Image (cartoon, helix red, strand yellow):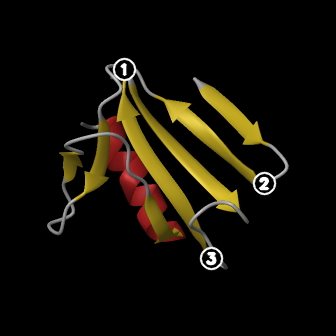
Amino acid sequence: MFNIVQNEFNEGFQMTFSNKMTVSVQCGRMSHSGHGSAEVAIWDDNDTWFILDQDDNLTPVEDGTEVMGWVPVDQVADIISKVTNF
């Protein structure tokens, strides 16, 4: 599933894959993004959120939600690939 997200503060998209993992990519004044970077969030259908650890592996967030900010475009593509193969 592919959704466009647009409001007065941010623009972006969400992709939910057959493995029921979702990647959200956001840019805008209320996100952790800037020139050439985006805010990225990852979660599954159980509402478990994930981040990339220091070894570049998807790791569940212990409590609540967490986003990765100021992610360069090449890394966004890498994250999407990791999520589709998780």
Q: Quadrant of residue 49?
A: top left
Residue 84 location (% of width, % of height):
35, 37
Residue at 36% of width from left, 26% of height from top? 47
Q: Quadrant of residue 50?
A: top left
To which residue does mark 2 refer?
A: 9
Left or right: 47, with 70 as reference point: left
Name the element at disc 2. Answer: loop
To which residue does mark 1 refer?
A: 45
Left or right: 48, with 38 as reference point: left
Name the element at disc 3. Answer: loop
Q: Quadrant of the C terminus?
A: top left
Residue 64 location (% of width, % of height):
33, 39
Q: Distance of mark 1 from mark 3, alpha carbons?
A: 29 Å
Q: Distance of mark 1 from mark 2, alpha carbons?
A: 26 Å
* Three-letter amino acid code of the residue under disc 1: Asp
Q: Is residue 24 above or below residue 16?
A: below
- Between disc 1 and disc 2, whose residue precedes? 2
Q: Is residue 39 above or below residue 65?
A: below
Q: Quadrant of residue 38?
A: bottom right
What is the residue that sits farthest to the right in this orientation?
8
Label 1 with label 2: CB-CB less than 8 Å: no
Name the element at disc 1. Answer: loop
CA neighbours of label 2 inside 10 A, class few (<14), some (14 to 19), many (20+):
few
- Between disc 1 and disc 3, whose residue precedes? 3
Residue at 64% of width from left, 76% of height from top? 34
**Given this view, does label 3 or label 2 mark the residue nearer the observer?**
2
Residue at 57% of width from left, 23% of height from top? 1
- Between disc 3 and disc 2, whose residue precedes? 2
To which residue does mark 3 refer?
A: 36
CA neighbours of label 3 inside 10 A, class few (<14), some (14 to 19), many (20+):
few
